[in-house]
Amino acid sequence: MPVGFVQIPVGIAGPLLLDGREYSVPMATTEGCLVASTNRGCKAILMSGGATSVLLRDGMTRAPVVRFESAKRAAELKFFLENPVNYDTLAVIFNRSSRFARLQQIKCAIAGKNLYLRFSCSTGDAMGMNMVSKGVQNVLDFLTEDFPDMDVIGISGNYCSDKKPAAVNWIEGRGKSVVCEAVIKEDVVKKVLKTDVASLVELNTLKNLTGSALAGALGGFNAHAANIVSAIFIATGQDPAQNVESSHCITMMEAVNDGKDLHVSVTMPSIEVGTVGGGTQLASQSACLNLLGVKGANKESPGRNARLLAAIVAGSVLAGELSLMSAISAGQLVKSHMKYNRSSKDVSNACC
Amino acid sequence: MPVGFVQIPVGIAGPLLLDGREYSVPMATTEGCLVASTNRGCKAILMSGGATSVLLRDGMTRAPVVRFESAKRAAELKFFLENPVNYDTLAVIFNRSSRFARLQQIKCAIAGKNLYLRFSCSTGDAMGMNMVSKGVQNVLDFLTEDFPDMDVIGISGNYCSDKKPAAVNWIEGRGKSVVCEAVIKEDVVKKVLKTDVASLVELNTLKNLTGSALAGALGGFNAHAANIVSAIFIATGQDPAQNVESSHCITMMEAVNDGKDLHVSVTMPSIEVGTVGGGTQLASQSACLNLLGVKGANKESPGRNARLLAAIVAGSVLAGELSLMSAISAGQLVKSHMKYNRSSKDVSNACC
Amino acid sequence: MPVGFVQIPVGIAGPLLLDGREYSVPMATTEGCLVASTNRGCKAILMSGGATSVLLRDGMTRAPVVRFESAKRAAELKFFLENPVNYDTLAVIFNRSSRFARLQQIKCAIAGKNLYLRFSCSTGDAMGMNMVSKGVQNVLDFLTEDFPDMDVIGISGNYCSDKKPAAVNWIEGRGKSVVCEAVIKEDVVKKVLKTDVASLVELNTLKNLTGSALAGALGGFNAHAANIVSAIFIATGQDPAQNVESSHCITMMEAVNDGKDLHVSVTMPSIEVGTVGGGTQLASQSACLNLLGVKGANKESPGRNARLLAAIVAGSVLAGELSLMSAISAGQLVKSHMKYNRSSKDVSNACC
Amino acid sequence: MPVGFVQIPVGIAGPLLLDGREYSVPMATTEGCLVASTNRGCKAILMSGGATSVLLRDGMTRAPVVRFESAKRAAELKFFLENPVNYDTLAVIFNRSSRFARLQQIKCAIAGKNLYLRFSCSTGDAMGMNMVSKGVQNVLDFLTEDFPDMDVIGISGNYCSDKKPAAVNWIEGRGKSVVCEAVIKEDVVKKVLKTDVASLVELNTLKNLTGSALAGALGGFNAHAANIVSAIFIATGQDPAQNVESSHCITMMEAVNDGKDLHVSVTMPSIEVGTVGGGTQLASQSACLNLLGVKGANKESPGRNARLLAAIVAGSVLAGELSLMSAISAGQLVKSHMKYNRSSKDVSNACC
């Protein structure tokens, strides 16, 4: 049914040295400077001994909205779900949706007589939206017996929350929650990033923390995480619309080792990725997953490929943040030395 | 420098009858059901006489952060910029960045001795980030004469705000601000959308308004605007990372004509698109722009092509919202009639 | 050490018929119309059979921020705290802070190598900030043995979050989470509230849901909950600064019984109140608590007085919302009948 | 109609040296430690040469919601209002509401066919809600002639936004927008605040910026601004419910003079205060206003008293932030020196 295809250029950034292994990161983007910029960040990380990541959480969510005749009844279902005995029964029902689906939590929110049930579950190597939706449908069907007065208004009540900026994802997490860090050596900051630690720390505080605070940002405490997330998402067949919350990120830059070196980190609570299903099956996207060694389902340990992909996304964002922040910082340092050409180049960098 | 290309399937939704003209909308996505779903929405709009759009605002922004020795001095620059005489001078300096750039406003935000200057300007048919950045650089260079104590920390201080969910874009707008509406006839809601007006209005209130409110959403008062925005962005060579704020949208559904018909609208304050530069020059993307009749710069009226593209994005989102909301609503109606197959299909629809 | 006192007039609203009992609600305010307005709402509730409330959650929070040398170490403490065995040990340590303190949860948030630990605990009839802070101090002292490299930056890291509008309270709750509802009969809406059900439902959707969405509201999906919360807080010796999050509220109005009657509800996730300690001991404030029958600690069931006070706050907010929304709605209805005097009165009402 | 009064103890903090003058600041609070803490901050400011404030903006707002048959018509009213010729006419109509009311701006927001008109005007020495509401009513009455199809849904559509946490106030401002700053000398930080510059800067970054970012804060980038705001509001007869947005504040702490001294600032965009009307007329509250020299209307320059009161509120918040942040910081320093008594005192301080 497709009438054709659009082609997006793919560049390779890296090697990205992450958790002791090197990765060549495919980025699909029409902005060449984005790959070059990320590449520079990878070089700085490599020369500093590499980056480390930790997976903090892994679960996809879906939140139907159901309505009762009264808030009292809505609360009764909430308490019913919070009762361990009932929860265990529902988990069995839910998990029938797939051999990979494992219910983790049901978080409830109430607005009068309307109840929002945010189901969270592990989904193996799949991004998991269909899996969790089916599990939710199973549970709703089951609940109609004990709660015949429950009126299911929608399988999704926006408390999930999918493809919308929402605090619930920023605070509770959705998909993979990952933190990634590196210590960049003083001389690497100077020679590769062309700036200095103090300037980077100050810029991060005034731009990524203070500026975003003034802008009323939600999960947007970074320079351009969305650029790297989209480029990798498109290259590896992820859902590019999920870039909205998958790019939630707080970038921290702190001086360490008596102010000589830079500790940089990105904390990303809702990276939604999979290595099976959807666009991952297309030829070119599949090749990009293969390049990263995360193609398809992980046989020994289901979910490991998707979790590794999330870690690579975070590691690449770390590289991208390092490089753009340095370009912005250096652009100004150079300005103060009246070298306009260099500065204008950085201005264009600042646009990636 | 690219090592290759990824291919994204392109489907055509439409005809979308918008402001009296019909458009075939190219959508690059790996989820076929997304095109089918949007297509159904277009059919409902077509059978109801078409959709209408209004451009509310058009300006790209960039906000550098500068620092002074005191808040007093930062405020002095703020007052200086708000003085019409100075503003007019700066506009001349700013507009030298391009024959299309026209400074519209400089909105200031202060955090102690740090000042954030949000420049807004029209940018012809270009998305405009580079244009506005150059204009900003011109103004900053000029200001250093009157404010030698101004320390430029960064050309972007995140008050812009680019590719991050931020209230400043939701409230002030960025790029094109568009509202698009249609009145869907009672029988079209029944026959094409397989639901009824009352159910849609109720679902919209409980999901897109109430559910998003509970989720702490920022500009995310819709069902899946991001799906349609990314699909068209990728097809037409836009920056997919800007999907983050370009998909900010509030979807309203109200019963009209004594409750018989449905008034549906989408209000999108920050659609960032261009028809020249960046990815729009690539062959397949250029062909998609051509299909819409918005390829390149508009000779008679600079900016008209980009504004029309924004309107088409909004119109397509209107169609997508109509169809998914109906699928969710109908899925439940059907559930109540115990037709599981139909329901499960809607569940998968609900995942697009 | 106080040099004197300010006097705030106290009016009585009610009787508020809540969960089968009648309450005379003391409101300390300089705006007489606020008491009159709330009183009208109480009358509407009384004539409709009363309001019902449900306590959804009860726990005070405090979140210290600690720093490690790496995100890896910060994550290790997170996983340590999430291990049931360790948690149980820490609960024993924490609970030593008071015979009423019972640790409920430790929710962690990470920003690079900085860890925020949101402790939640029940606190009997006390609002509980001091109690939870002492418990947190106990746990931090204890943890320094297993985590000698943990650097305690602050006993409060703003992830608590106290006296600041923050999504974490809106989503997780703080203090008492209460939902309160009532069904207002058709004729009561007409005769007492001087408006009609359809107008109220529409106004609630366009003002409390849509208008607040456009304003970028956080937990502010109501008309004037803060007015009632502050008035009762001041009258009963609560901390008026906590009005910030205690007034978080989503007001829902839905037509029921074939559209004849009005179902109205307020859902308030973070009402922070106590009946012992702080200002509750002062003579006049203590008298107000006595008037409500919630003075001091509840001997049979510790915490019952504070929970009842929270329910009364929610019930009074329900009355206040009903009345002001009706005044705004009626003001316009009357406008359409060209009765200016009445309208202007409603305008002033709209200012409470 | 009041049945009695509650008494709130009033303490005096100060002298607060602000813009070259000393003020004794009345604080009505049941927490004695709050006055003592603020007093310590005032001492640190006094010994460092005083604080400086700048008024950035001054205007009260009210936003009615009106509905049309189509978004097209709603947009037509928006464009009509943005036309300078029409605006000038409306300003004349609006300003008839009071000899002090001066219309400054009408900011429009659209949600489909619903239009929200945020009127902003100067209001002399009054807080101004009634004044602006009357002006809005005048304009709405006038507009019905040119826009007979305009349906006024409510005089307040929550885009104002009054007594609710909303980004529109944080970004646009409401009431008085004030920035206040001071440079605290190194030895004063040591001797009076019992901590050091580096610790304060770090705590501010990790608590007031990073911690609040993680918590999804809106305008809550401070330690306890709400405490000081409410205490002064209650003492001087302001509306304590407006503490919600009046306490919006971003506190910045930066090392200056080669890291020796501390530059501290508070930026508060929406301080809603008045020196006439409402609670300001009550005896004790009037006395407190007198103590500050801002009682009643300013004859020579209408509005000067209210603006000065706003500056004093900001200056007192500056003092309060300095002191509590120091207590939290010192509490930990002391902990490391194993002096538990001192620490526990700081813990209780941390609760104010």
Image: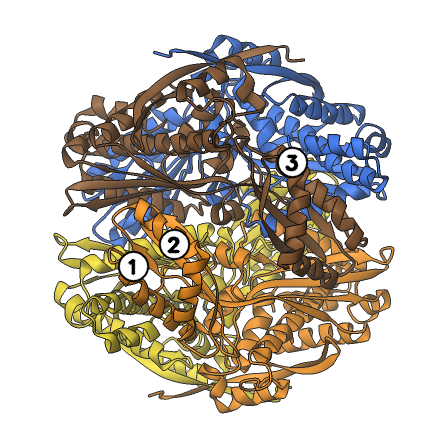
Chain colours: A blue, B brown, C yellow, D orange
- Spatial separation of the CA atoms under disc 1 and disc 3: 55 Å
Please tell me how crowded label 2 is: few (under 14), some (14-19), or many (20+) other residues with Cα within 10 Å.
Answer: few
The picture places residue B196, in percent across and down from the top left corner, at: 17, 37
Q: Quadrant of residue D326?
A: bottom right
Helix, strand or loop at label 1? It is helix
Q: Is residue A330 above or below residue C308?
A: above
Q: Nearer the viewer, residue D221 or B54?
A: B54
Horizontally, is B137 left or right of C86 in the view? Answer: right
Q: Residue at x 33, y 36 (%)?
A: A156
The picture places residue C247, in percent across and down from the top left corner, at: 43, 63
Asked if disc 1 and disc 2 are in contact, CB closer than 8 Å, the reply is yes
Name the residue beneath numbered marker 2. D80
Horizontally, is B138 left or right of C9 in the view? Answer: right
Please tell me how crowded label 3 is: few (under 14), some (14-19), or many (20+) other residues with Cα within 10 Å.
Answer: many
Q: Residue at x 72, y 82 (%)?
A: D22
Asked if disc 1 and disc 3 are in contact, CB closer than 8 Å, the reply is no
Q: Nearer the viewer, mark 1 or mark 3?
A: 1
Asked if disc 2 and disc 3 are in contact, CB closer than 8 Å, the reply is no
Circle number at residue D146: 1
Question: Can residue D179 be seen?
Answer: yes
